[in-house]
Image (cartoon, rainbow, N blue to C red):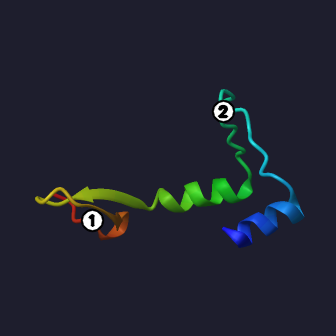
Amino acid sequence: MNATDRLRFFFGPATRLDTSLPVVHKHDEYEQASEEELTHFVVETDTAGHHYAVRREDVKET
């Protein structure tokens, strides 16, 4: 705790945000690119209940 006490002295106390405010999500270019990449995956569940992602082109059509 000595290191954190020294950092607090140097940087000041941590700022606390108002937790009653809603979280603001910014839809920037990076987030849009990430969402586009995630559309190439589908979530599968095995018989043991484990979840995993599979590329859509690798999914066997039944």
Nearer the observer, 34 or 21: 21
Closer mark to the observer between disc 1 and disc 2: 2
User: In the rendering, at what x and y percent does residue 58 appear?
Assistant: 31, 70
- Relative horizontal placement of residue 55, taking residue 29 as reference (left or right): left
Q: Quadrant of the N terminus?
A: bottom right
Would you identify the image quadrant in which residue 35 lies? bottom right
Nearer the observer, 49 or 11: 11
* Number of other residues with Cα within 10 Å of mark 1, as a class: few under 14, some 14 to 19, many 20 or more: few
At a point 79% along the width and 46% down the height, the residue shown is: 15
Residue placed under numbered mark 1 in the picture: 59
Residue at the limit of the structure toward the left, as seen here:
47
User: In the rendering, at what x and y percent does residue 23 appear?
Assistant: 66, 37
Q: Which mark is residue 48?
A: none
Residue at the limit of the structure toward the front, as seen here:
2
Q: Which mark is residue 19?
A: 2
Total number of numbered labels? 2
- Relative horizontal placement of residue 14, taking residue 56 as reference (left or right): right
Given the image, on which type of amino acid does mark 1 rest? Val
Residue at the limit of the structure toward the top, as seen here:
20
Q: Look at the picture and state if 21 lies above or below 28.
A: above
* Number of other residues with Cα within 10 Å of mark 2, as a class: few under 14, some 14 to 19, many 20 or more: few
Mark 1 element type: loop
How far, Cα to Cα, is label 1 from label 2?
Answer: 42 Å
At a point 77% along the width and 51% down the height, the residue shown is: 14
